[in-house]
Image (cartoon, helix red, strand yellow):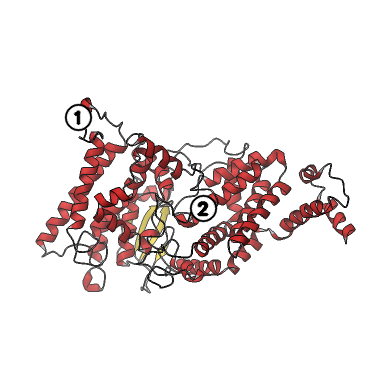
Amino acid sequence: MIMASIFSFLLLAKTAHFWKEVNGLSINHRNLSKFTRKTTLFMSAIDTDSWTKLQSSASQTKVGAALDLESVSRIEGTGAPFVQNKIRLFDSNERPKLTLYRDHAGWCPYCQKTMLLIEEKKIPINIELVPMRSYGDKPQSFLKMVPSGLLPALLVETNDGRKQVVTESQVIMELLDQWHPVKDGYRQMMPSDDDEEGQQRYSQLARLERELFSWWCTLIFRPEGPSGMFGKLMGSGSSGTSGAMSGFLDCMAKVDQQLASTSGPWFFDFADHPTMIDFIYISHVERMLASCAYWKGLDLRSESYNKQFPALNAWLDAFEKRECYLAFKSDFYTNVMDIPPQYGPGYDGGFEKERLMYQKSIAGRDGKSWTLPLPFDDPLQPLYRGPPLPLCVLQAAGIQGDNGIVGVEGTSYLKADEHIVAAACRQMAGWKLASNGEKVARFAARGGPGGAKNPRKGFGAELADPYANPDKDLLPYVDTALKLVCRALLTEGGPDSHAAALNDMKESLQVQLPKNKARDVSSALAYLRDRVGVPRDLPLAAARQLRAHLNEAIGALYS
């Protein structure tokens, strides 16, 4: 048996890089166990780690099986809300005559608010995904239809076969609401026509939203003014904050007052669900939270600001308990990457100590937010004030909400078993990686020294690289590394099983990859890590597991 193992080992060792790893190791009774360990790791990976087998392994987990079924439902138009759905039928059996063109990555706030209206009203619609200018070229077929390239755009097919295109999110939303009235069973989204007071309130709130947006742009996208005596002459606040900061916070206080004036969490009391004006606000408030933390050190959901803006935070909590909102919600990292190409560069300022701390946390450079072992929650971006994962995943994993019911919206998950939640997050990330492994490996290989060198058009988004080619020489090594990461993500069991899987992953990386390729493969893994988008690729709870496991692999390759 020993001779057979050594013979097999020598056959495998014909690959030059693997031979270098064991060169100089003499075989004797003292180091045979170490020798056999390397052999086992190498052979195990070769024998089992094909993407097809990893995909099969993913589907055999309860989480993966649930996601497989959900994928079929999404294709049929009957699944849960999802940022890359192509059709939404809800309870309809007819082919929709409406087609919404929206952005592919989930970056556009105007597409987001339109989709929230569609999901909450359950409007049957076709969906076509189009790149934003900041990260890709729009197809000519779309530009022929919408020469301006504006997103979102609505294509309307009439009963006589004519087609008409509508642009501007506000116009699209109002038309969709009018065409799907309450009398036909759809949810009310606007004050009724005979509600004069409600109509006036809606107009007032819409103006306040534009005022808040203006103050946000002044605060984030312009150099912040001084805060001393000269600053007071220029309009800075008495507390020493800049005029832009004071103006933004004063305006946010007005928003908080308007929310506090209703009996529920929403801007209107005529419904127990968010309405049109809530959607108009939330898509930009979400971006305000990220940008204020990153560029100004201002955490509007901290304990102190929760006391200052209690109604605002209750409104955010209510949104985060809704599955359809979470399906389109970005994390702070994705937002601060996608905001500059849309609005312009953000300027550092505000509270420097907090800003530096938040910037490290958001970008995964604090040694915690993208590093194993991950903390249960993220202090800047609360994960468990609502469902942290799709409901089908929570149900498959048996994860209870704080109301005692498994896998439902409308409740928080702060008391959920952290080990079960972590395993479900890992398995969702592993399922996603396994389902598209070869393409992900090619994408990651762009980060190698021979990748991304082809002549190509530049784009506004810092990390956009749609025409880059992979480093073909490095690709097999990147592919191997990602298979090992995927295997660790898919491991079932508790913390001990996961720890053992991580050790196997790290040892296998060191055995299978030649040392002279380690740094190049690390660069490719970092390239992928920095381009994991929320919600396009995964919800934040699963995305941070993928980022952290990629970092674990990078660390192993550098050691």
Instruction: Pick the quarter of the image with the N terminus.
Output: bottom right
Q: Position of residue 248 (x, y in %)?
A: 24, 41
Spot the residue most to the top. 230
Q: Quadrant of residue 468?
A: top right
The quarter of the rendered structure image containing the C terminus is top right
Amino acid type at image mark 2: Leu
- Which label was assigned to residue 426? none
Q: Residue at x 80, y 45 (%)?
A: 22
Question: Circle 2: is it few (<14), some (14-19), or many (20+) Cα within 10 Å?
Answer: some
Q: Nearer the viewer, residue 382 or 274?
A: 382
Location of mark 1 (residue): 232
- Tag 2 secondary structure: loop
Q: Nearer the viewer, residue 164 or 352?
A: 352
- Kindly identify the amino acid type of the residue bearing the numbered disc 1: Lys
Q: Decide: marks 1, 2 in contact (CB < 8 A)? A: no
Mark 1 Cα shell of 10 Å, populated few (<14), some (14-19), many (≥20): some
User: Gap in Å between the C-alphas at discs 1 and 2?
Assistant: 44 Å
Residue at horizontal 25%, vertical 54%? Answer: 310
Q: Is residue 161 above or below residue 14?
A: below
Q: Residue at x 25, y 44 (%)?
A: 213
Please indicate whether residue 207 sits to the left or right of residue 37 in the image: left
The tag on residue 374 is 2
Classify residue 355 as left or right of residue 32: left
Lower sequence index among marks 1 and 2: 1
Residue 486 x/y as whole percent: 61, 56
Q: 172 or 248: nearer the eye?
A: 248
